[in-house]
Amino acid sequence: MLKILVCVKQIPDIDLVKMDPETGNLVRAGVPTLTNPLDLNALEAAVQVKESYGGEITLITMGPPMAESTLRECLAVGGDEAVLITGRPFGGADTLSTSYSIVKAADMEGRFDLIFCGKESQDGATGQMASQLAERFDASQVSCCLSIDEIGDGKLRATRVLETGREIVEATLPCLLTVEKDNFYGRLPSLKDYLAAKTAPITTYTENNIDGLDLNKIGVPGSGTIVPKIYPPELPEPGRIIRTGSVKSDVAALMDVLTEKGAL
């Protein structure tokens, strides 16, 4: 039976996040949260593999206690087990320390044959996590996966998307995959599965119960990058459309603008 791990993340609704003009930091307080949409595509890919080849799906996330709701959402659409990594020492983590924490907690659950991740998260959008996890899991990696064509004899064959077309690749297990959403749209839960997920047990790991966890490699101390400030880009002056009704007057108006701007 395949052991499958799906990494998910709870993010703030980026359409509602505001910026503190004094500090330049994002203001997340009071902002609704949601499951990173690209992680739901990864989960759907994992569920399709489970349906075709058999297996057990473990979900894992790192975040505050309220991230439990994301795990329950994913349990309702095909996850079997769920793991939450939480605690103040994990706060302020970049992708380096986050990937370390996830792998150390995942090791507590055994060895996984397949690991699925979203291509990126909508709040950070670095696209770094999958490659870091593949390295830490000592796993092969298939990115931009369009379809999973065959699994067997410790290998996986998949079709991936390139800028110039498609490519069929073979990888050894364990393998980490990021997927394209074209064939892996997230599904809706049944009422039965939704209700079951509301009371399903969730394994919780903190800095105190993960074997071999180095506190200097988690949270801020383990982060190789620090973001001192976030600020919106300076927008250029908006353009103007000159449409007076005749070519002659349009040209005259354009010359006036260019003269005003010192371009002539």
Image (cartoon, grey):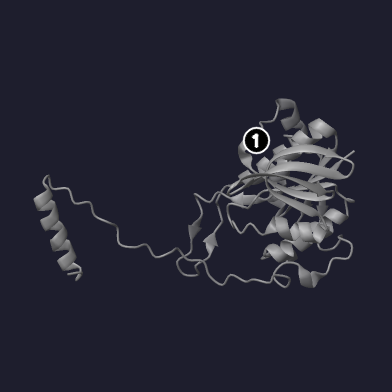
Q: Nearer the viewer, residue 54 or 64?
A: 54
The quadrant the C terminus occupies is bottom left
Q: Is residue 29 above or below residue 152?
A: below
Q: Nearer the viewer, residue 41 or 20?
A: 41
The structure residue drawn at horizontal position 79% and vertical position 54%, both measured from the top left corner, is 140
Q: Secondary structure at mark 1?
A: helix
Question: Which of the 4 image quadrants contains residue 263?
Answer: bottom left
Q: Is residue 76 above or below residue 68?
A: above
The structure residue drawn at horizontal position 27% and vertical position 56%, both measured from the top left corner, is 239
Left or right of 18, for residue 159: right
The quadrant the N terminus occupies is top right
Left or right of 231, for residue 127: right
Q: Position of residue 236 (x, y in %)?
A: 34, 63
Q: Which residue is mark 1?
A: 183
Asked if residue 185 can be seen in this view, the reply is no
The structure residue drawn at horizontal position 29% and vertical position 58%, both measured from the top left corner, is 238
Left or right of 215, for residue 14: left
